[in-house]
Image: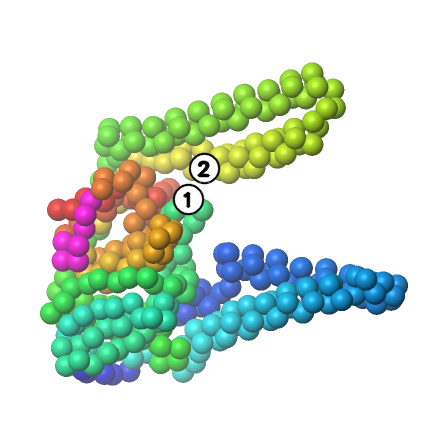
């Protein structure tokens, strides 16, 4: 094992800054539990001031439980943020060069283990690219819980690790092929996107029909079962809020004239899929770059580390990669 220190690059700094943010479901849960804690505290204060002893004990118990949960959630989130941010201190990172014997996901869930040919274990924290609501890979990162990792064995790898926080910034596999090219959108690609857009149009029509029926039946009922109609209408409104932006995104895809094709050897496959739940994401590391695998059309490709692949992405107007169209094993 060979180690050396080198300055952080701009990409390293962006990874550490974005991975330290509290976002997504964790942020929503923190806000929810904080709001519930404040509401229960207000009720407790009102019960104490109004001397409502019958309410005081149950509200006190509920407040203590929720406040404890809220405290530990904030404590864990802020601790994680502090650990990741510590990687920016000093502006340095470690380069660890080893020959891989095995890769494992640690029992800690957020750690990866690289085992060298000399049986040395390098344990690092994982940071994976974030995704948008439409499964486009973003240029920001998030701290991730990894359930499984597989990779090339018998290969040399250079691990870029932050000196503070022990965050894996990059796993560099020398002499592995990688390339990006642009190509014209084919007739099959266009058909695939139009089929997706057609599905959304059908959902729109279903929603319009449903709303029309609700209004018609509501008028016939003249106020009877009004609560039921409100609930159904709310469901359709939520449906519209989700379907409308998706329609415009896929409409912009259908107008795209070119795509980006990534070709290279898969060096690692990282999965956040939870056992027995089927939820999570899969990432391919092609050479040293990570790609979210959420294609519009799933070809059922069985890719293993060491396989060469083609990943086809929509090319957006700004020249960046959009949603993955499909992945092909070469």
Residue shown at the point (36%, 67%) measured from the top left: 109
Q: Nearer the viewer, residue 97 or 303?
A: 303
Q: Quadrant of residue 312?
A: top left
Q: In the shown orientation, is residue 325 left or right of residue 204?
A: left
Q: Nearer the viewer, residue 68 or 317?
A: 68
Q: In the shown orientation, is residue 12 left or right of residue 35?
A: left
Name the residue beneath numbered marker 2: 246
Residue 175 in picture, x, y percent from top left: 12, 65
Whether residue 284 is in magenta: the answer is no
Residue 40 in picture, x, y percent from top left: 72, 62
Task: Point out the image quarter for the N terminus.
Answer: bottom left
Q: In the orientation shown, which residue stands out farthest toward the right? A: 50
Segment colored magenta: 301-307
Name the residue beneath numbered marker 1: 134
Whether residue 304 is in magenta: the answer is yes
Distance between the alpha carbons at the discs numbered 1 and 2: 7 Å
Please indicate, yes or no, whether residue 7 appears anywhere in the rendered image.
Answer: no
Please indicate, yes or no, whether residue 241 appears anywhere in the rendered image.
Answer: yes
Q: In the orientation shown, which residue stands out farthest toward the front? A: 54
Q: Secondary structure at mark 2?
A: helix
Residue 151 in picture, x, y percent from top left: 19, 63
Tell me if mark 1 has few (under 14), some (14-19) or many (20+) residues whose alpha carbon lies within 10 angstroms of its own.
few
Work out whether mark 1 precedes mark 2 in sequence or the reverse, and give the earlier one: 1
Q: In the shown orientation, is residue 187 left or right of residue 250?
A: left
Q: Are marks 1 and 2 in contact (CB under 8 Å)?
A: yes
Which colouring convention does the figure follow?
Answer: rainbow
Task: Answer above or below: position of 257 versus 86.
Answer: above
């Amino acid at each position: 094992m060979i180690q050396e220190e080198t300055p952080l690059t701009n990409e390293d700094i962006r990874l550490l800054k974005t991975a330290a943010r509290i976002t997504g479901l964790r942020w929503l849960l923190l806000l929810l539990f904080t709001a519930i804690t404040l509401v229960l505290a207000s009720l407790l204060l009102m019960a104490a001031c109004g001397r409502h002893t019958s309410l005081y004990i149950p509200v006190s118990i509920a407040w203590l439980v929720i406040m404890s949960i809220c405290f530990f959630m904030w404590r864990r989130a802020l601790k994680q943020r502090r650990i990741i941010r510590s990687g920016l201190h000093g502006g340095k990172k470690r380069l660890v060069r080893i020959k891989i014997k095995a890769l494992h996901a640690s029992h800690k869930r957020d750690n990866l283990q690289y085992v060298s040919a000399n049986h040395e274990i390098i344990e690092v924290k994982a940071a994976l690219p974030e995704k948008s609501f439409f499964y486009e890979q973003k240029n920001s990162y998030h701290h991730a819980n990894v359930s499984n990792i597989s990779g090339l064995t018998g290969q040399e790898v250079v691990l870029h690790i932050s000196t503070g926080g022990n965050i894996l910034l990059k796993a560099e596999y020398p002499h592995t092929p990688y390339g990006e090219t642009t190509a014209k959108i084919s007739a099959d690609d266009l058909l695939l996107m139009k089929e997706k857009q057609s599905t959304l149009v059908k959902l729109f029509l279903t929603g319009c029909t449903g709303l029309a029926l609700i209004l018609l039946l509501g008028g016939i009922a003249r106020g009877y079962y009004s609560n039921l109609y409100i609930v159904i209408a709310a469901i359709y409104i939520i449906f519209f809020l989700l379907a409308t932006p998706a329609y415009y995104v896929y409409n912009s895809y259908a107008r795209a004239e070119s795509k980006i094709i990534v070709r290279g050897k898969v060096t690692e496959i990282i999965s956040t899929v939870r056992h027995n739940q089927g939820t999570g994401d899969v990432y391919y590391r092609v050479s040293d770059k990570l790609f979210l695998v959420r294609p519009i059309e799933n070809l059922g490709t069985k890719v293993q580390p060491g396989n060469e692949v083609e990943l086809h992405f929509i090319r957006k107007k700004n020249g960046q990669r959009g949603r993955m169209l499909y992945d092909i094993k070469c």
